[in-house]
Image (cartoon, helix red, strand yellow):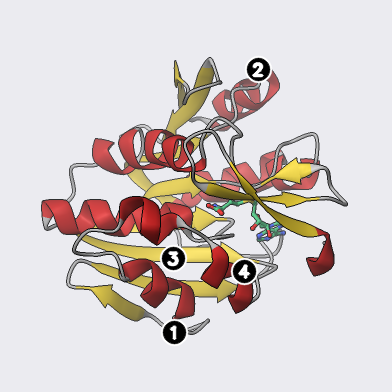
């Protein structure tokens, strides 16, 4: 992915996304980046977990929007979230400075977006009293997550048509192994072939109402 092919665009809820010209792909839904991220990952993922301290893995850190919304939710509920964010192609800091997520949401934790986007790669950083992040510059295809460790996985890779290698069974199986029993993986994707593959691995698969502009999304649970 060439950095000079990335353009900043405004989505329907006023929040920014990035368009990658050489892939013809967006980082978020056109119907609202914040709305999609809040619905798919925070509301249908994080909020479904009962644990007091949550271990979370994100595949595809990108702009940090999912991490930011998770940080706000953790502060609101005084629930500790330890967030491991995987990204092969970190964005340059100039792009983070242009993103308007702080301005859209602000509030007491407004500067947590700046803190998490500027936190160093490779070491855990406390962004707020209830949120720490470890940004890992690594390739998901060779990444070996800790087994039975995560309560929730945000799977936010580019779409299967654009990056089919990210959606291969062997990688979804290693994510299954990385979940604690009862842990969940959420993704904006709702493809039948992805659902069937997840079921064949052993996940219990739920089709949920998707964010604005999408009929469905997937929540996949590792049975207890
Ligand atoms: C749909 S975007 C993620 C959006 C992100 N969660 C956000 O809120 O901005 C997909 C992300 O996956 C990253 N990615 C692509 N291939 C990867 C790989 N092999 N390993 C890790 N990350 C990868 C891309 O660089 C991009 O940031």
From mark 2 to mark 3, how far is it between C-alphas?
28 Å
Label 4 sits on a secondary structure element that is helix
Q: Specify which label sits upstream in the sequence, 3 or 1.
A: 3
Q: Earlier in the sequence, mark 4 or mark 2?
A: 4
- Indicate which label's residue lies in the foreground, 4 or 2: 4
Q: Who's the residue at 39% across and 39% down the image?
A: 184
List the residue tagged with mark 4. Answer: 95
**4 vs 3, front mark:** 4
User: For this view, does 36 lie left or right of residue 48?
Assistant: right
Mark 4 or mark 3: which comes first in sequence? 3
Residue position marked by numbered label 1 in the rendering: 123
Q: Quadrant of residue 111?
A: bottom left
x%, y% of residue 89? Answer: 70, 68
| Residue positioned most to the left | 78
Query: For the residues carrying marks 4 and 1, which lies nearer the camera in this image?
Result: 4
Which residue position holds label 3?
84
Q: CA distance from mark 4 to mark 1?
A: 22 Å
Do callouts 4 and 3 mark residues in contact (Cβ within 8 Å)?
no
Callout 2: SS = helix
């Amino acid at each position: 992915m060439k950095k000079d092919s990335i353009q900043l665009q405004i989505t329907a809820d006023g929040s920014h996304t990035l368009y990658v010209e050489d892939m013809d792909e967006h980082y978020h839904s056109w119907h609202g980046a914040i709305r999609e991220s809040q619905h798919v990952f925070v509301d249908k993922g994080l909020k479904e977990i009962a644990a007091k301290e949550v271990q979370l893995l994100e595949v595809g850190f990108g702009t940090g929007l999912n991490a930011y919304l998770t940080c706000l939710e953790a502060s609101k509920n005084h629930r500790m979230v330890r967030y491991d964010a995987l990204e092969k192609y970190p964005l340059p800091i100039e792009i983070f400075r242009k993103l308007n997520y702080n301005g859209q949401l602000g509030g007491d934790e407004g500067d947590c977006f700046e803190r998490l986007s500027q936190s160093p790669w490779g070491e855990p950083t406390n962004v707020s009293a209830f949120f720490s992040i470890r940004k890992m510059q690594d390739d998901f295809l060779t990444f070996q997550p800790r087994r039975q460790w995560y309560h929730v996985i945000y799977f936010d890779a580019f779409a299967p048509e654009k990056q089919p290698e990210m959606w291969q069974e062997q990688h979804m199986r290693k994510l299954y192994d990385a979940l604690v029993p009862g842990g969940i993986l959420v993704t904006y994707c709702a493809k039948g072939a992805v659902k069937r593959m997840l079921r064949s691995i052993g996940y219990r698969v739920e089709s949920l109402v998707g964010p604005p502009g999408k009929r469905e999304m997937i929540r996949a649970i590792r049975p207890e």
